[in-house]
Image: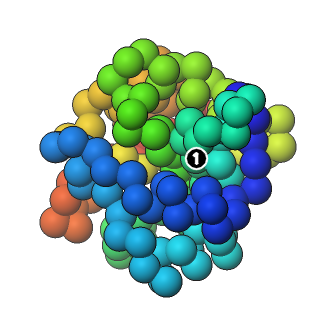
């Protein structure tokens, strides 16, 4: 796996991904606004040796659910992480290696506790994060229920 700076080609492909229900919650629309979000914030593409997109990650406020600020979900000094795995690869056991690669990269560059925000219904992702030592911190509704998870150093 290789990390590439997000570019327009990668962003357009990612924004056109479509997940099956119930994960279709994570589907995006390709709009000028969503494209700019990915290009102007710290988003990174994860590609294989053929430059095919495996997934992506983002850090900082780009990884936060904006409504979470109303619930004080982001007051602790943490590095927020958001990830997305190519829908063609989900549910096939790739998540562990994919997430381990991202965590290793982030932990080499940042030395703060890590935080994720995940939709509460996404038990598959929550289970993955717990395998890596993340623990549930708080919940908030937007009306979708979200859980923040922390990994202390």
Quadrant housing residue 135: top left
Q: Is residue 65 left or right of residue 109?
A: left
Of residues 17 and 25, the one nearer the viewer is 17
Determine the residue located farthest toward the front in the rendered image.
Answer: 50
Q: Residue at left 70%, top 33%?
A: 50
Determine the residue located farthest toward the bottom in the rendered image.
Answer: 32
In the image, is residue 110 above or below residue 6?
A: above
Of residues 73 and 128, the one nearer the viewer is 128
| Position in image of residue 81 (x %, y %) | 57, 49
Which quadrant does the C terminus fall into?
top right
Q: Is residue 111 left or right of residue 31?
A: right
Q: Pointer 1: residues within 10 angstroms few (<14), some, or many (20+)?
A: many
Residue holding disc 1: 56
Q: Residue at left 16%, top 66%?
A: 143
Q: From where the camera sits, is residue 68 visible? A: no
| Position in image of residue 70 (x %, y %) | 35, 75
In the image, is residue 21 above or below residue 132?
A: below
């Amino acid at each position: 796996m290789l990390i590439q700076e997000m570019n327009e080609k990668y962003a357009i492909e990612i924004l056109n991904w479509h997940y099956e229900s119930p994960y279709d919650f994570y589907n995006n629309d390709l709009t000028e606004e969503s494209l700019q979000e990915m290009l102007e914030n710290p988003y990174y593409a994860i590609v294989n040796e053929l430059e095919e997109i495996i997934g992506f990650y983002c850090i900082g406020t780009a990884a936060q659910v904006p409504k979470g600020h109303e619930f004080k979900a982001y007051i602790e000094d943490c590095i927020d992480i958001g990830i997305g795995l190519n829908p063609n690869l989900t549910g096939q056991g790739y998540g562990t290696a994919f997430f381990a690669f991202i965590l290793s990269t982030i932990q080499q560059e940042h030395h703060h506790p890590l935080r994720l925000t995940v939709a509460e219904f996404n038990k598959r992702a929550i289970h993955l994060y717990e395998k890596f030592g993340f623990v549930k911190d708080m919940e908030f509704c937007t009306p979708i229920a979200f859980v923040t998870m922390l990994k202390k150093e």
